[in-house]
Image: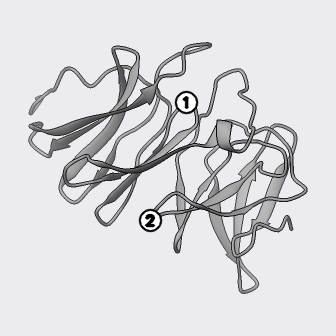
Amino acid sequence: DMLWSYEGIGDGWGSTSIANGTIYLVGSIDKIETVTALDLNGKLKWKTAISDRWRKSFPDTRTTPTVEGNNLYVNTGMGNVACLDATNGKIKWQVQTVDKFKGEYHRWGIAESPLIIDNMLIATPGGPDASVVALDKTNGKTIWTSKGLSDKGSYCSPILVKRGGKKIIVTMLENHFVGIDATNGNVL
């Protein structure tokens, strides 16, 4: 038996995250990527509009929110990386990574979820010397870019692998499978 349902979350391709007794998801509402927070009984806590949705092939949202403590992070189909207050939905900071790092959209836009490592948020805008970037998770400022790596992103969320005493970011790009030193962005 269905316990409850909620309509009005929008359209999209991402999944939900559950943390702090809250269900978080991103959907396209009136062509705007919008984060919705529901309590575990399906009651709306808040909704926050982030940016225009991806409008080309397979439009609508494609990120799964990443929650760490009272922060919620998303990366929209247009490459807008945002940090929201997970308790009230207020946007703390936002960076248009594709524009900032001169990235290039591919067929289905940006389709990834942010990776949090220590004080960094990892994203893949696919720009020159910036296929992978680390942003300060508290304010969105650039910590490092992957110098010497100028491949477009792919439809893959980066992961963290700990190996040989190193923290390594592993992800797929358009033409490469890469390992990157999380401390400085060096391509391994």
Please tell me whether mark 1 sits on a helix, a strand or a loop.
loop
Rendering coords of residue 175 (x, y %): 87, 39
In the rendered structure, which amino acid carries the disc numbered 2? Answer: Thr
Front-most of residues 75 and 2: 75
Along the line of sight, the residue nearer the viewer: 39 or 184? 184
Give the residue type at disc 1.
Answer: Gly
For label 2, the SS is loop
> Residue at the location (68% across, 56% down)?
133
Where's the N terminus, which quadrant?
top left
Percent x, y of residue 72: 36, 53
Label 1–label 2 contact, CB within 8 A: no
Q: Which quadrant is home to the C terminus?
A: bottom right
Report the residue at 47% width, 20% height from top: 60
Which of discs 1 and 2 lies nearer the camera? The answer is 2
Image side of residue 20 versus residue 150, left or right: left
Q: Label 2: few (<14), some or many (≥20) within 10 Å? A: few
Identify the residue shown where x is 72% and y is 37%. Answer: 154
Q: Quadrant of residue 104?
A: top right
Image position, residue 108 (x, y; %)? 65, 23
In the rendered image, residue 181, in percent from the top left (x then y), is placed at 76, 71
Q: Which residue is mark 2?
A: 138
- Vertical order, 179 against 79 (above or below): below
Give the residue at the far right of this rendering: 148
Q: Which mark is residue 52?
A: none
- Residue in front for this viewpoint, 124 or 144: 144
Question: Would you say 46 lies left or right of 178 here?
Answer: left
Where 180 falls versus 149 (above or below)? below
Q: Dividing the picture into quarters, in which one does residue 96 lie?
A: top right
The residue beneath circle 1 is 77
- Label 1: few (<14), some (14–19) or many (≥20) C-alpha neighbours in 10 Å: many
Say which label, 1 or 2, has the lower sequence index.
1
